[in-house]
Image (tube, helix red, strand yellow):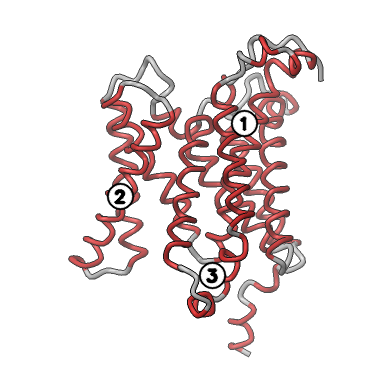
């Protein structure tokens, strides 16, 4: 791993790792609360918000993108409540209709808008631009100590790194109320914990991670990382603390192996061209989840209650 690795592969791998960790941490609590669809939904909802923010401001800066995503989330909540009350259908169906509609609207807006001068199109929304986040000024590992070279790092790296640190900090600070309200909401209310605010804060944190990761890695990785590493970790242990560590480890392994396989995998099998890094990272996380389903030490927990009832 010499100068070529530092220039072409180091920053995409780091961005993929930070994005995976930022999504996997809140994903643990979403999976335990049976709200895994929220992560999927957020990944869909942010697209029209980001596109509208770009059409209004003409820039892809972080603040307008976050405001656009937040606005889209508010519209989504209003649509879900309206569909539930007026249509009298179950919340899951209302969420599915809303998020699918908004994502389709975002794709149509992208398709009909002139966004050719920025990295904002349908392919970028799905796959991101991970492979293009190259550190052009890097000349080797010594560039890590060169201020001039560090100043030329892709902006996406600093952005997702800060968000990753923020998610880690929030997880540590609010660990106890998150843990109590996740496993026993009634007990949390008896202790006086603001259960509703904790749940809302968890969704907001997931939204921040999704928006920050969306710009660099696309919605495919975001959706996969919210669900696959936490779900695989859930099959490895009964301890929440260990589950979080397992999920982070799975997220890191998925990002690193996915990027390597995307670049070199086709060559190993006689192919000529690399494949999408985002797609391969999501595929690796799915394979890890599949292996956990087959060999995880706590896989028997899934459906155990149903089997006992049937017996």
Looking at the rendered structure, the secondary structure element under dot 3 is: helix
Q: Which mark is residue 181?
A: 3
Q: Position of residue 271 (x, y in %)?
A: 67, 23
Left or right: where 40 falls relative to 278: left
Q: How far apart, in angstroms, are the residues tagged by discs 2 and 3?
A: 24 Å
Q: Position of residue 33 (x, y in %)?
A: 52, 66
Left or right: where 108 falls relative to 254: left
> Which of marks 2 and 1 precedes in the sequence?
1
Nearer to us in this view, 181 or 256: 181
Q: Which residue is mark 1?
A: 15
> Which of marks 1 and 3 precedes in the sequence?
1
Look at 79% across and 17% down and name the residue there: 141
Q: Quadrant of the N terminus?
A: top right
Question: Foreground mark, 2 or 3?
Answer: 3
Q: How far apart, in angstroms, are the residues tagged by discs 1 and 2?
A: 28 Å
Q: Position of residue 124 (x, y in %)?
A: 45, 28
Nearer to us in this view, 152 or 255: 152
Question: Foreground mark, 3 or 1?
Answer: 3
108 relative to 204, above or below:
above
Label 1 neighbour load within 10 Å: few <14, some 14-19, many 20+: many
Choose top left, top right, bottom left or bottom right for residue 11.
top right
Q: Quadrant of the C terminus?
A: bottom right
Question: Looking at this rendering, what residue extends furthest in the left direction?
Answer: 86
Q: Position of residue 29 (x, y in %)?
A: 56, 60
Q: Which residue is mark 2?
A: 74
């Amino acid at each position: 791993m010499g100068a070529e690795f530092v220039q072409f592969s180091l920053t995409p791998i780091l961005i993929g790792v930070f994005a995976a960790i930022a999504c996997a941490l809140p994903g643990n609590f979403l999976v335990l609360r049976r709200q895994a669809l929220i992560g999927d939904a957020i990944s869909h909802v942010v697209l029209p918000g980001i596109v509208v923010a770009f059409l209004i401001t003409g820039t892809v800066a972080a603040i307008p993108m976050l405001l656009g995503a937040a606005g889209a989330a508010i519209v989504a909540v209003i649509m879900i409540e309206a569909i539930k009350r007026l249509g009298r259908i179950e919340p899951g169906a209302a969420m599915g209709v809303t998020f699918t509609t908004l994502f389709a609207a975002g794709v149509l807006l992208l398709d009909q808008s002139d966004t050719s001068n920025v990295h904002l199109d349908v392919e970028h929304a799905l796959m991101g631009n991970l492979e293009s986040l190259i550190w052009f000024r890097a000349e080797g590992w010594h560039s890590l100590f060169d201020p001039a070279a560090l100043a030329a790092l892709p902006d996406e790296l600093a952005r997702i790194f800060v968000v990753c640190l923020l998610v880690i900090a929030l997880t540590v600070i609010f660990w106890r109320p998150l843990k109590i309200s996740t496993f026993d909401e009634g007990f949390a209310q008896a202790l006086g914990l603001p259960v509703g605010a904790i749940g809302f804060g968890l969704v907001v944190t997931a939204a921040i991670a999704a928006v920050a990761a969306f710009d660099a890695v696309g919605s495919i990785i975001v959706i996969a990382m919210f669900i696959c590493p936490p779900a695989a970790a859930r099959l490895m242990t009964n301890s929440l603390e260990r589950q979080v560590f397992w999920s982070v480890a799975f997220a890191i392994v998925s990002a690193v192996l996915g990027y390597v396989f995307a670049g070199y995998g086709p060559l190993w099998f006689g192919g000529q061209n690399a494949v999408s890094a985002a797609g391969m990272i999501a595929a690796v996380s799915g394979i890890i989840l599949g292996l956990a389903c087959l060999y995880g030490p706590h896989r028997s927990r899934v459906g155990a209650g149903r089997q006992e009832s049937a017996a």
